[in-house]
Image (cartoon, coloured by chain):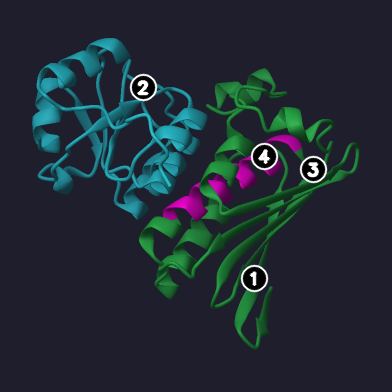
Amino acid sequence: MTLKKIKELLKAEVICGHDSLGIEISFAGASDLMSDVLAFGKPGMLLLTGLSNLQSVRTAEIIEAKAIVYVRGKMPDKEGIELAKKKGIPILTTKLMMYTACGILYQNLLPGAYVPQENK
Amino acid sequence: MMEKRENGFSLQFEIKGKDFVNAGSVSTKVKEILQEIGINASIIRRAAIAAYEAEMNVVMYANRGVFILTLTPFEINFKVEDEGPGIEDIELAMQEGYSTATEEMREMGFGAGMGLPNIKKNADKLGIASIPGRGTILEITFYLSNQ
């Protein structure tokens, strides 16, 4: 599924990474807790989160997430956008609640990132 | 600060406690260095996660700390030494879900009691030493031999 398709499905606004809407996303993960994202995130995943501080962008960068979707209409601050631009991580924001946003993507056959097993 | 060795090098970075704006910048830098050197991507990813968790621990709990990256032909080593409250019970701190985090830390998306267990999960070797009231030293090692 392309990021453009995700944008359309979630009626999302693009905050940065307008040029990257063609990238292919093949799985996603969602959490407001960066501790969990660090523990269960997978490289290449789409990160859905309601936590829009700088740490959410850093966490996405560390786990090598392909893109971030902020839910509940959250907007990242200036530093977050700057870091995302620098690291080439597209950011979208949707007014949808987390549950609904995930539900829509899952319904459209975007699977979850986390499979319970040792990741080493 | 960089120290060259016969077989590798050592780099030292300062971490400021409670500096949430720069929190994570050392790990980002360390990750960039490992990428430039051409370390295996899956090792970089594990190392970056462990570095970030360790750095966030210093930012959240300690007054200050130093992060020393040492690279040899055989391993990557992070020594993260802080001046801070230390850890009263290391065995307890290693349990998933145990946390002494404040509300502020949780609002930032951290403090779920996953940090040290996640470092251990990603590292090949983890050593922890702490004196309550003084500080904590983490030694995190990743072996390169299986590349």
Q: The residue tagged with tag 4: helix, strand or loop?
A: helix
Q: Does residue B53 appear to the left or right of A83 in the view shown? A: right
- Which residue is located at x 54 percent, y 42 percent? B121
* Callout 3–callout 2 Cβ contact below 8 Å: no
What amino acid type should be assigned to the residue bearing mark 4?
Asn
Between residue A6 and residue A107, name the one nearer to us: A107
Tint of chain B: green
Seen as rendered, the residue at the extreme bottom is B6
Q: Quadrant of residue B14?
A: bottom right
- Above or below — where is A84 with respect to A113? below
Q: The residue tagged with tag 1: helix, strand or loop?
A: strand
**Mark seen at residue B63:** 3
Could you tell me how far apart the alpha carbons at marks 4 and 2 are, in whole angstroms?
26 Å
The magenta segment is B45-61
- Which residue is located at x 47 percent, y 29 percent? A36
* First-in-chain label (4 vs 1): 1
What amino acid type should be assigned to the residue bearing mark 2?
Lys
Residue depth check, mark 4 versus mark 3: number of the one nearer the observer: 4
Q: Read off the residue under disc 4.
A: B57
Q: Which chain is cyan?
A: A
Residue A97 is at least partly visible in this image = no
